[in-house]
Image: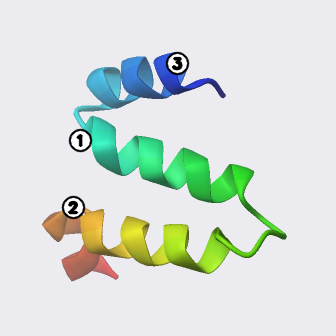
Amino acid sequence: MSDDIAIKAAEILGLDAGYVLACVTAERAKNTPSYETWVKICERLTPKKRREAA
């Protein structure tokens, strides 16, 4: 999905747009050297409620 759609989805779902953009970027980066870095960023930005549920 595009960044603009990701931001709209974040708004609809009540999620932080930065978190959603980071996750979308991580998904796009699969099989590249930057993938692991984006995954770590997503983990740091994961909303507290999701971390506690995991």
Mark 1 closeness class: few <14, some 14–19, many ≥20 residues within 10 Å: some
In depth, the one of 18 and 47 nearer the eye is 18
What's the CA distance linking mark 3 and mark 2?
20 Å
Q: Residue at x 30, y 43 (%)?
A: 18
User: Height in image: 6 above or below 34?
Assistant: above
Which amino acid, by three-letter code, is at mark 3? Ile
What is the C-alpha distance between the residues marked 1 and 2?
8 Å
Marks 1,2: beta carbons within 8 A: yes
Say which quadrant the C terminus sits in. Answer: bottom left
Rendered position, 4 above or below 22: above
Quadrant assignment, res 20: top left
Give the residue at mark 2. Answer: 47
Q: Which amino acid does label 1 sit on?
A: Asp
Which of pointers 3 and 1 lies earlier in the amino acid sequence?
3
- SS class, disc 3: helix
Q: Disc number at residue 5? A: 3
Dot 1: element = loop
Q: Residues within 10 Å of mark 2 (few under 14, many from 20)?
A: few
- What type is the residue that disc 2 sits on? Pro
The residue depicted at 30 percent of the width and 36 percent of the height is: 17
Of the pair 44 and 37, the residue shown nearer to us: 37
Q: Position of residue 35 (x, y in %)?
A: 66, 71
**Label 1 sits on residue:** 16
Is 22 on the left or on the right of 52, as rendered? Answer: right
Q: Are marks 3 and 2 in contact (CB under 8 Å)?
A: no
Residue 5 vertical position relative to residue 51 in the rendered view, above or below: above
> Horizontally, is 32 left or right of 5 in the view?
right
